Amino acid sequence: YPKKDRLPDVNSPQVKKWISEIDWSKVPKIPIAKANIPNCPDCPKNKSKIPKGACWWTCDGCVADDDIEICPRQNAWGLTYDDGPSEETPRLLEKLKRSNVTSTFFVVGSRILEYPETLKRQIKEGHHIGIHTWSHAGMTSLTNEQIVAEIKWAEQIVFDVTGLKTKYWRPPYGDVDNRVREIARQLGYKTVIWTKEWDSNDWQIPDKTITNKEVYRNFKWALSTVPSLKGGIITLEHDLFTQEVNVA
Ligand SMILES: [Zn+2]
């Protein structure tokens, strides 16, 4: 496998094989975004600078027809945790078990290297697994080949550990445009983001840019909007840091 939290080598025979299975004539030629990899690329200050036809969710909120950003059923709640598995994940699993709740975990492939048993436990306890790439880079800042490698290596390790083939993925930071989408589609994936306003922002607690209290308060406010929504909600939480699992 490639190294933890590092972009995979795109010249390995394995990756070359995956790349050769894509029909590149169908992948739109949208310019690669500038970023300090693995960070999320900055959006152009002027919205008119967003490439035409990009449908770049993080920058203009554009959603493709086959993106999943809400639950079809009203009042349904799709609870999702990203960025694990980590040493904090078992504690979250205990919490979920106590509440008799299952969730979807979007796992970072390279973090499974250290915690394969946690992944097996997540499945055994009835949770769903989607992938969240190999190294958690912003996808619109990667080359086509790097995107293939990021998705397929994550798929590969989940398969090797569990025998299961994943069908859903969530782009890190929600950073997806039509180039990234088409590659994911051809690899057999449905792109899952989250419902607007439903990022719990728990990831900001470790940075101290938000407090536990504010996370709870925002969440309560968001709950009050549920009756006016067309469908149910998909919320975003994380299981990488202690503080995130504390508010889970
Ligand atoms: Zn993430």
Image (cartoon, helix red, strand yellow):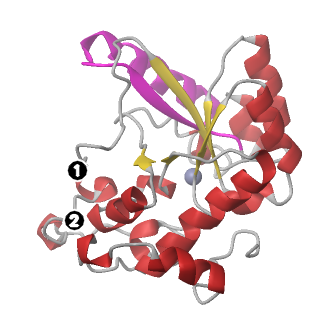
Q: Which residue is mark 1?
A: 62
Whether residues under marks 2 and 1 lie with C-beta atoms below 8 angstroms apart, the answer is yes
Identify the residue at horizontal 73%, vertical 63% (top origin).
Answer: 110
Identify the residue position indicated by label 2 in the image.
Answer: 54
Badge 2 amino acid: Ala
The answer to if 231 sits in the magenta stretch is yes
Q: Is residue 123 left or right of residue 141?
A: right
Say which quarter of the image contains residue 17. bottom right
Q: Is residue 73 left or right of residue 3?
A: left
> Is 240 colored magenta in this rendering?
no
**Residue 205 in picture, x, y percent from top left:** 64, 43
Q: Is residue 45 left or right of residue 173?
A: left
**Residue stretch rendered in magenta on the structure:** 211-239
The percent position of residue 66, horizontal first and vertical second, equals 29, 43
**First along the sequence among labels 2 and 1:** 2
Residues 219 and 77: in front is 77
